[in-house]
Amino acid sequence: MNILGISAWYHDSAAALVQDGRIAAAAQEERFTRIRHDAAFPSRAAAWCLRRAGVQVRGLDAVVFYDKPLVKFGRLLETYLSFAPRGLVQYMQVMPSWLKQKINLPREIRRHLEGYQGPIFFGDHHESHAASAFFPSPFREAALLCVDGVGEWSTTSWGVGSDARIELRARLDYPHSLGLLYSAFTWYTGFKINSGEYKVMGLAPYGEPRYVQTILEHLIDLRDDGSFRLNPDYFNYMAGTTMTSGRFHHLFGGPPRKPESRLTQRDMDLARSVQDVCELVMLRLARHVRKETGLRNLCLAGGVALNCVANGKIHREGIFDGMWIQPAAGDSGGALGCALYLWHQYLENRRDPIPSDSQQGSLLGPEYSSQEIDEALAAFGARSEALEQDELIRRTAQLLAQGKVAGWFQGRMEFGPRALGARSILGDPRDRQMQSRMNLAIKFRESFRPFAPAVLREYVNEYFEFDDDSPYMLQVAPVRENLRIAMTEEQQALFGVDKLNVPRSIIPAVTHVDYSARLQTVDEARNPIFHRLLREFHAQTGCPVLINTSFNVRGEPIVNTPQEAYVCFMRTNMDVLAIGGRLLLKDQQPPFRDDGAWKTRFELD
């Protein structure tokens, strides 16, 4: 049975194909259109999923959408009426797209999936999140916690999953939202909502929690069980076109930071403060859910579940024995969750958990044959060396050990926002200058942004205060004390991003200013070739860790095709590209001018 799950028209649209309960394919639309966080109907992602599985549109048994548009439409109308006439501008901006597309979703689905005549189902937004977290997890029974901006009405929900069923037992409703609170500070500190939250989390360790009490006293009424209410006087997202109100700006001493302007200590302190509040809420929610359910394991989803610092706090508190977090925890994962919900819960098919998980390393996207890679490189006149896999791995590890930065393009693309060793840029974490070099000269992004360590699973406990699986880069843990470098008095007196160039450990490029790191544990079962590269790097250097960051530059999605990989390689200061069975060195390549002409030669189907 072929079930196509769809998420669309908010942010990070995606499609996922489930065949007889197995995840056959999943991808975000942005990877095909090259529009970051693309919200459009995932026509290209859906078409690719069907091609991958050899299924025609007419061969689909069901299509399921990840939420209920009519319920969401009702929430929007009720909100605008409640704040009339203040909400008129936003109403006029939003309503045309609803009246044209979203309110006639069955028609739109059949228009984009030409020839489909089968049934169309609609899931509940938070049930789709919960299903995406529980059904692929290794647990037969688990507590469920979903926290995001907003679905139809729900912003926070919890429940239980058992065998092939989930049940959400409690929820908080809009406008009281932890995700929207975090997004308000994201907007106020000058970053884009629905993408800049990562930056706020990365900026937080440079600040001090000066505003925590202010937030708790004025913005959020937080209870012991993790439930809360926001004070609407300080926010503008209910009826306006901005996230925060004048009263919010007065409370925190000034207007919002202008995007791209210089970051101040106040911005860093605000980031630290809202991050601390987020962690406090998540810890209280987790304790309450453990108490109410009595279950030993926890599954997390929703956009806030991408806050790996909060996840790490829950893990270190030992509230649950086991945790599993959906790697596509945001709206893209809803496409997968609603398809799995239909298969297991609606159609009552059995579920057999896999001891690791059934997410397949989240390597669920497109891959390219040797012939396709060779043809793409030949069209650019690229100079490459064909190598057997063992030699490719040995040479790449050797070049990384020499301080080179390598693009790594192997196998199926990742589903979700993180590069996990298929579409990655790699570097040596022992190099003190590597973080700054990779941020500024390769990623073209802010220098304070941290990089993640990919570490062999069998060595994680030797380098980090962590002895568990974190295969999807969704938990933060401290670097072990014996590997840290003590700061001098002069260094301790530094403020803000001045702390950036102070080495904190023997792997300084992946050690954040608070001695933490965002972990990806790598095992042979989920990603055998990346595991082999790490083993080879360890054999050559004695270090089982590599820097792993996504294969893209600022403002662009992760590369999908060999053509995009080569262009990104040539546009940046990467030294090496290992793509399929080919190894390319930058200094051997012909001159390259990115005039965009290459795109017309490689139009997507």
Image: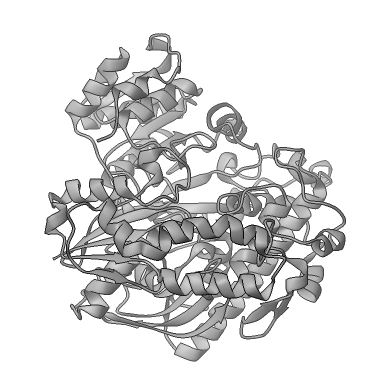
Q: In this orientation, does residue 538 appear? A: no
Q: Quadrant of residue 294?
A: bottom left
Relative to residue 190, is residue 167 drawn left or right? left
* 537 and 200: which is toward the camera: 200
Q: Quadrant of residue 234?
A: bottom right
Where 129 falls versus 185 (above or below)? below
Q: Position of residue 405 (x, y in %)?
A: 47, 28
Where 364 falls versus 536 (above or below)? below
Where 383 falls versus 55 (above or below)? above
* Residue at (57, 26) in percent of width and height: 441
* 446 and 182: which is toward the camera: 182
Q: Quadrant of the C terminus?
A: top left
Indicate the colouring scheme. Answer: one colour
* Residue at (53, 69) in percent of width and height: 150
Q: Position of residue 599 (x, y in %)?
A: 36, 24
Q: Quadrant of residue 381?
A: top left
* Residue at (36, 67) in percent of width and height: 132
Q: Position of residue 218 (x, y in %)?
A: 80, 73
Q: Quadrant of the N terminus?
A: bottom left
* Residue at (24, 47) in percent of width and height: 47
Q: In this orientation, does residue 244 appear? A: yes
Q: Position of residue 222 (x, y in %)?
A: 69, 80
